[in-house]
Image: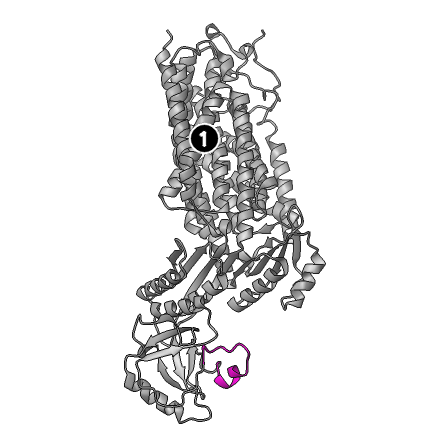
Amino acid sequence: MKNRGRIVAFLLLIVILASTIFSTTSPILKDVKLGLDLQGGFEVLYQVEPLKEGQKITESTVADTARALTNRIDVLGVNEPSIQIESNNRIRVQLAGVEDQKTARELLSTQANLSFRNADDELMLDGNDLKAGKAKANFDENNNPVVTLEMKDPNKFGEVTSEIAAMKPNNVLVIWMDFIEGENSFAEEAAKPDPAFISAPYVASTINSSNVEISGNFTIEETKNLAGILNAGALPVHLEEIYSTSVGAQFGEQALDKTIFAGIVGISLIFIFMVLYYRLPGIVAVVTLSVYIFLILLVFTLINGVLTLPGIAALMLGVGMAVDANIITYERIKEELRVGRSVKTSFTAGARSSFAAILDANVTTILAAVVLFIFGTSSVKGFATMLIISILVSFLTAVWGSRLLLGLLVHSGYLDNKVGWFGLNKKHVHSADEGYETLDLTTKFDRFDFVHSRKRFYTLSIILLIVGAIMLGVFKLNLGIDFAGGTRVEILAEQQLDETEVTNLLEDIGHPTSDVVISGDAKNIAVARYKEDFTQEEVNKIKKELSETFGSEPNVSTVSNKVGKELVRNAIYALGFAAIGIIIYVALRFEWRMGLAAIIGLLHDAFFMIAVFSILRLEVDITFIAAVLTIVGYSINDTIVTFDRIRENLNRSKHISEEKELATIVNKSLRQTLGRSVNTVLTVIFVVVALMALGAESIRPFSIALLIGLLAGTYSSIFISAQLWFDLKKKQILKSGGLKVEKEKKQWGSDEPVV
């Protein structure tokens, strides 16, 4: 009996969803905060060090320092800065959209210890003699910008000026910011065109006043900044830069445009594939995937997240992973239809039987994402955050949303006996009278005897791993500055660049290096690497020189050896904890043999990715670890689905008395899930290839790592993990004496019904 009400409800839901998305997407997108890699800006990681000998750095000291930095940023007028206190007495500052990065970094790192000294560098007054919060940007009688201060004790200031006035001809009151004993000298600095002191006015007579005027060659903006930083107060500690990265605005804008375009192309290909392959369920998947993308952006803005390039990649990757849940369900429904069950019964049974596999796959992927969040740096944390949100939202839209919409259509009665609407050919459908079970169904892969050929796969993998180990030993890894420490300078030009010209230019400006690589589609990007980490002054200098030459501000990242070693250690911890978490979960949900086989497969994938990167000399940075952990989650996802089917088919067999029976179950399970594996990896590859070909240059190595990992992960799930489990399970049954060992014979038959 047909129910038009369900069709009307389906159409109403589509209209409501479409109108909601179209009417609110634009405001939501306006509220999305862009990271510094998408709009320019800089990030600095400070190590809080004692200012004076014997000073103890406590939690309250670090907190006070963070508040002082916040006050200084308020002076800059930066929108929504990010200041985070991290372990080991560190403070991470992220300022996106800052145009004058040089001034901003100087304002942040300066101690703001104001001192008044005589010509012999003797301290006469310091910041403690000033009234707090009384510094003001002003103008003198000649309308020149100045900063006015107020003294606590005018009599003390009078005594100091009297002493200075008597020191003719060196009767100058030298005003210093962050004077360093033993390094700074008025005599030396006075001879320089750009001295380190703020100003050095002559004092002719005693000045009995509480008002002090600091004049110099200031701009109006500089007086505002100086007044603001003095009012914010001196820092109670010394801040040492141990990591920094800066991105020019043009780099950020270009990266955003290219990556969004790549995303549109990749996601569109997924939509087209789903509709062509799965027909009506594919259309439902397109609707729920659109809702998924909308909800991701909505949740991200609600939690005040910052969108970065890796975050966009995680969103796009999430689309490919979200469609996986749809594919698992649709493949299950098609299996039920093939054994002659009705559309309604097939839908109910397919939805129920696919739930466990989807749940297990999502939990294991979340485990990897959580570990990535805990051990990752700022941009990687953004990637992990987006990945976690993507997994949770995809579970909601694919498991609940898709089934709700498809269920309305199925239970309306209009799809009864219309298997073609599910992308199924009628000649592959058995009659219910034949008594077929899903385990008996044929597949497109029945010619493959996976178990019989497992030793060939083992041999192939062992050869590849040995070759990879040798190549890795010879070539080593091309470690980026994240792990090796040093400085990376990325230059963007309007014209095609030449490696020799860039090398000569860098030598001319005082920063020679032989490590220059030209990249980009138009060969207009040059990347120069240095083994040493640049100081703030060196960063400012090279940025100024290159900006004047190429017309756009370069990206400069610098990492100390201390941070590089920590990142290596954290990467090892991340991979280790992810592996432990997954093996425990798989062992509890299935059995320890499946957990062990899955982890061996994951190690196979991770090492394969590392070996390929070594051979191709691709740079290994922190995003590579993000890619490895993503593949760990994705590969285990694939393996879990295979193991879930093996477990299901095992449960249907009451007793296994021969090795041949166990091999049949493994082969059947692999054949039944291989179509799903191929379709899933294909949808993700659409996105990854789009990122590689059309996305930003900075995430290309990340995309390459994902592609290598996807292919390796699919291979290991089918040809390594499942086969290892077979061997482990066979030994268990052999020990119990319940298995008759026979010489393996390759089977090529097909049980497809003759039509």
Which colouring convention does the figure follow? one colour
Which quadrant is the N terminus positioned in?
top left
Question: Which residue occupies 51% across, 41% down?
Answer: 313
Which quadrant is the C terminus positioned in?
top right
Q: Crowding near pointer 1: few (<14 within 10 Å), some, many (20+)?
A: some
Q: Is residue 187 magenta?
A: yes
Q: Which quadrant of the view contains residue 556?
A: bottom right
Question: Which residue occupies 41% across, 15% down?
Answer: 410
Question: Horizontally, is 501 left or right of 601 in the view?
Answer: right
Q: Is residue 713 magenta?
A: no
Question: Which residue occupies 51% across, 83% down?
Answer: 190
Judged by its main secondary structure, the magenta piece is: loop
Between residue 732 and residue 323, name the one nearer to us. 323
Q: In the image, residue 472 lies at what x, y percent?
A: 63, 50
Please tell me whether residue 724 is drawn above or below residue 491 in the rendered image. above
Tell which residue pokes out farthest to the front in this image: 142
| Residue range highlighted in magenta | 184-199
Q: In the image, residue 79 lies at what x, y percent?
A: 40, 54
Between residue 222 and residue 6, name the one nearer to us. 222
**Is residue 407 in sight in this rendering?**
yes
Q: In the image, residue 201 lies at what x, y percent?
A: 43, 83
| Residue that mark 1 sits on | 290
Please tell me whether residue 117 is drawn above or below residue 382 in the rendered image. below
**Is residue 684 in sight in this rendering?**
no
Q: Which quadrant of the view contains residue 707?
A: top right
- Amino acid type of disc 1? Ser
Residue at disc 1, secondary structure: helix
